[in-house]
């Protein structure tokens, strides 16, 4: 493997990943809306939680689902296209893995926007689709089935696909560069979620202090992503979040 080419691949991935389509779309369709500072209401609570990420979810919550979907697709493509280009142009070496990994890093910490970006799921699947399109489809589908239909937990549905990439790569590829790539992707993804985890923990603490019910055995609706996935799961009939009266009757 040529070091210069590997560095070029990493640089291309990072610079492409740093493009913030959430900001681009928001600037075009709603130039007067500041998507950087938004307090998302928490269902059944007097508190809100600040959205720290700037990504497809940010746009969907503030500007509408169709624009959030558009951002998500563009975020997938901004990593998938350069990764696929490297894979096709230099098929004998896995430079596309460097593009994919650093595309994720750029998405989460974009150099163009003071290192404040998204949380990486779209970028991860963009890179993984260029690496193994079948694996991307299988892990995503399995994650949604396990998370939403079996365990009824949106956190598992959200993160499960990324975790499932590890056994998929090990079984299907049995290649150390590929295994190192998917482990690094999980590490970067986990680090990117730390701000949200801290925010959710602080919100939970404040709600507990105010005597609010913080337990939700069906789905975590504290975060905007959790609310979106919960709403989607209810619409397609995967599960039903019980009302307060149903919870009382069940007890």
Image: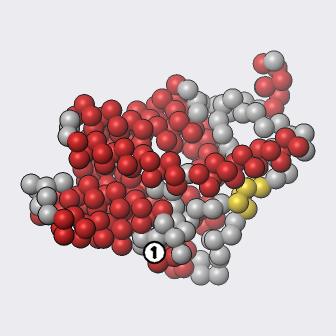
Closer to the camera, 112 or 41?
Answer: 112
Q: Which residue is mark 1?
A: 111
The extreme right residue here reads: 210
**Which residue appears at 39% of the width and 35% of the height?**
164
On the image, the x and y values in percent for residue 61 come to: 62, 60
Residue 6 lies, with reference to residue 189, above or below; the image says below
On the image, the x and y values in percent for residue 241 come to: 68, 33
Closer to the camera, 85 or 3?
Answer: 3
**Which residue appears at 30% of the width and 45% of the height?**
180
On the image, the x and y values in percent for residue 66 come to: 51, 61
The picture quadrant where one finds residue 172 is top left
The extreme left residue here reads: 92
Considering the image in quadrants, where does the C terminus appear?
Answer: top right
> Is 53 positioned to the left or the right of 120 in the image?
right
Closer to the camera, 193 or 78?
Answer: 193
Residue 239 is at least partly visible in this image: yes
Q: Residues within 10 Å of mark 1 (few under 14, many from 20)?
A: some
Element type at marker 1?
helix
The picture quadrant where one finds residue 215 is top right
**Which residue appears at 23% of the width and 42% of the height?**
176
Closer to the camera, 242 or 6?
Answer: 6
> Is 207 positioned to the left or the right of 98 in the image?
right
Residue 73 is at least partly visible in this image: no
> Is 171 positioned to the left or the right of 61 in the image?
left
């Amino acid at each position: 493997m040529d070091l210069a080419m590997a560095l070029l691949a990493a640089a291309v991935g990072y610079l492409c990943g740093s493009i913030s389509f959430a900001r681009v779309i928001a600037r075009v369709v709603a130039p007067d809306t500041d998507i950087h500072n938004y307090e998302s209401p928490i269902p059944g609570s007097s508190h809100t939680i600040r959205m720290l990420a700037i990504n497809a979810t940010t746009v969907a919550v503030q500007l509408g689902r169709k624009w959030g979907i558009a951002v998500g697709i563009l975020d997938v493509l901004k990593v998938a296209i350069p990764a696929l280009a490297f894979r096709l142009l230099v098929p004998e070496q896995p430079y596309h893995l460097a593009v994919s990994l650093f595309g994720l890093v750029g998405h989460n910490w974009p150099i163009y926007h003071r290192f404040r970006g998204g949380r990486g799921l779209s970028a991860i699947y963009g890179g993984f689709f260029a690496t193994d399109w079948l694996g991307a489809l299988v892990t995503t589908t399995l994650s949604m089935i396990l998370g939403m239909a079996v365990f009824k937990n949106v956190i598992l549905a959200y993160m499960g696909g990324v975790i499932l990439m590890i056994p998929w790569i090990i079984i299907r590829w049995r290649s150390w560069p590929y295994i190192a790539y998917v482990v690094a992707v999980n590490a970067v993804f986990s680090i990117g979620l730390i701000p949200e985890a801290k925010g959710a923990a602080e919100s939970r603490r404040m709600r507990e202090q105010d005597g609010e019910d913080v337990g939700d055995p069906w789905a975590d609706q504290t975060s905007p992503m959790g609310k979106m996935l919960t709403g989607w799961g209810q619409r397609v009939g995967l599960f039903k979040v019980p009302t307060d009266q149903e919870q009382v009757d069940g007890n």
